[in-house]
Image (tube, rainbow, N blue to C red):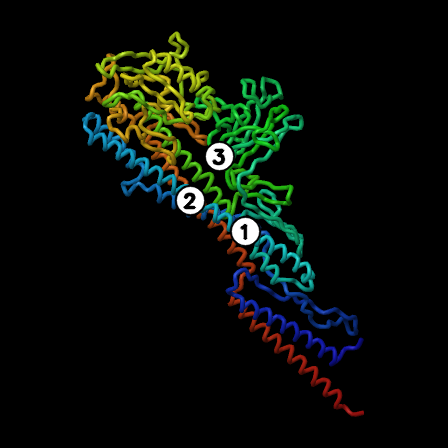
Amino acid sequence: MSFGANSILDMGRWALFASQTQLQVTGQNIANVNTEGYSRRSVVLEEGQYIDYSPGQLGTGVVAKEVVRHFDDMVEAMYLQQSSLTDKWGNLWEQLKSVENLLNESSGSGVSDSLSKYFNSWNEVSQRPDNYGARQTVLNDTATLISTLKQVDTDLTLMQERINNDVSAQVDEANKLMEEIASLNKEIQVHNIEGQNNANSLFDERARKVRDLAKLVDVKTIDNGGGEFTVLTQAGQTLVDGESHFSLEFNSAVKTEDLRPDSTFAGNVYFDGNDDYEYTIEFVASSSGSNLAGQVSSGSNAAQFKVSLDGGVTWLANEDGSERHFAARDYDSRVNVEGLQIWFGSDTNSKGAPAGTFQKGDRYIISPHQGLYWVQNTSNVEEITPQQHFNGEENSRRLTGGSIAALLTFRDTYVGKYRSKLDELARTVVWETNRRHSQGAGLQTFTTLDGTYRVDYTDKALASDSTGLAFGDKLQSGSSFVYVYDESTGLLASSAALDFDGNGGTFNPAIHTLEDVVTAFDNTYGGRINASIVNNKIRLEAADGYSFAFGTDSAGLYAALGINTFLKGETPKDMLINEKVSGDLDYLATGHVNGSGEMNAGDNTTALSMYKLREAQVTMHTAHEGATTQSILDYYNGIVGNVGSDTNRAEFNKNFFGTLSNDLNERQQQVSGVNLDEEMSDLVKYQASYTAAAKLISTADQMLQTILSLKP
């Protein structure tokens, strides 16, 4: 090969092309300086090949090898994680602020104020027990308390329903992004030729989509080059794998089975009801050292299981701290566990008889609410609904970041906790009020009275998990007194505690049924009181010429059955004033029956007891906190304090992770961002190179013209 004007001309042509490419790429950078997700590009120049020649090795110019994209994959991976956490805590903070506003007591019309007025009204009526105006004030302030509790509970419920709608929309958005990322991977496979034709625009678009996806769910990526790009959740569920993508689903209540290899149980678990928590059921050994748990049975030999509401980290406990166990029953003996009725049936029929024997460790998981699921295929669906253990740690096998995790965590962990505590507050107000009122007396005696609490089974022990009695767990062994009066004379005709065996036997909640209570009423007072069961509730009717009143009840039987009670229901949703009292103020119990069997109009014993409830230390129990002993007002103030603490924590984490993600984004921008000053400097430099290359071509042309002008 010879060198001369032609080789210089060719060298100038390639230099001109290289400078032109650099100018075009610089122009692209400048044009996209404000384009979100755009990564700065540059041209990689490579010296042309060398040719051995005399007087030495000579070059052939420059080659514009490829246009590269400036992007730091390691920084981006760290950014994605912090960005997901920032969006999670940011969304949580926004949602929690709405709860904080809901429980704002500064207006003087919140739950705390209503509770204070409720207790104060009892203090007022204690000073004038026979004054109907004071009695009506008790009813009015009680109605205000009930209305306030209902409104707070309704607002919290509406928040959860709104969250479900938001999650459903965001799941659709996440699925769309996953599909688009897979499609981009396919395009990149077609267009990207490593080192020759880099699909920079497609890479940028894919990075933008991944960032958008990271705002919704926590993600991590594996990049094997080109379209071999994988997106997973932090827990490891694959969302995109090259050209393939999976999906997320937001489904209604489901249940899953996890039986030990040696289990012979053939059947399924069934439930009725809904709750904010996920229930983990695990069977325990029937005896020490055994792996056998037992069978489904209505008897005392039924298999026993424990229940966890936080994924098996902690288990439901009795008030004394011991682990609480439940019996495996069939449909006709189904047990009540927190917010659900649970029983076992055949695989195809919830009321059918199951077969086989449970082994220790057999598990069922019940999700009694809408949850988030990762769908690999029709036969492989995995729940990834965020779950927080009661010790504060998150389940790392579930979703832990992004706005979807924030919304579901807010719905279940936060609002679920607040509603649970609000339910326990209402339940305690009802029980403690009824416990006192049911042993008190108003201004007149009863001739007929209907209990307000029903049972599912009239022939099962009232404290049994299967009975369905709202306050069955509050019952104790003890005596329950009734006073019977002759209406014509007003004199006491009979007074005694209910006799459950004909020999003065007292009530035992682990043995006695509603039918036993009816029998005890019929047999104890010589036919002066007739008891019956109507709609699974007790009804008491005095025989002609008689009436009755109630006295000391150490068993809590009257309060549990709704006999001579002031309130009905057990949660804010169903809490009401007993129609017997609201229909006739004489039945508002402000006094009591004294040792002589007398009811005095000026007696304020019960009213004072109600007012003292304001400061009384009572035990309240929730699944996530266990049993606590404090006053009712302090308990509610604790709920408000929890909301404030949770809101502050969310704000702190939002700012903390936001600072980290902003710092990582700035580091990425230092690499991939367009700096106009640098680009303008490069523009001048490349323009000069282009001019020089053009000058080189002009010089080579002149050399050729000189050669051509030579004459032989």
Residue at label 1?
A: 172
Q: Quadrant of residue 527?
A: top left
Label of residue 656 in the image: none
User: Could you tell me which secondary element the residue under label 1 belongs to?
Assistant: helix
Image-based side of 431 in relation to 486, left or right? right
Q: Residues within 10 Å of mark 2 (few under 14, many from 20)?
A: some
Residue at label 2?
A: 159
Marks 1/3: CA distance?
Answer: 27 Å
Q: Is residue 629 visible?
A: yes
Residue lying at 24% horizontally and 28% vertically, measured from the top left:
585
**Amino acid carrying mark 1 in the image:** Asp
Q: Nearer the viewer, residue 151 or 15?
A: 151
Label of residue 273 in the image: 3
Mark closest to the chain's N terminus, 1 or 3: 1
**Amino acid carrying mark 2 in the image:** Met
**Amino acid carrying mark 3 in the image:** Gly
Marks 2/1: CA distance?
Answer: 20 Å
Most extreme residue toward the bottom is 711
User: Could you tell me which secondary element the residue under label 3 belongs to?
Assistant: loop
Q: Is residue 623 above or below residue 532?
A: below
**Residue 338, x across and y down, in percent:** 46, 30
Q: Nearer the viewer, residue 45 or 246?
A: 246
**Residue 170, x across and y down, in percent:** 51, 50
Q: Residues within 10 Å of mark 3 (few under 14, many from 20)?
A: few
Q: Is residue 470 above or below residue 554?
A: below
Q: Is residue 55 above or below residue 179?
A: below
Residue lying at 64% horizontally and 80% vertically, measured from the top left:
695
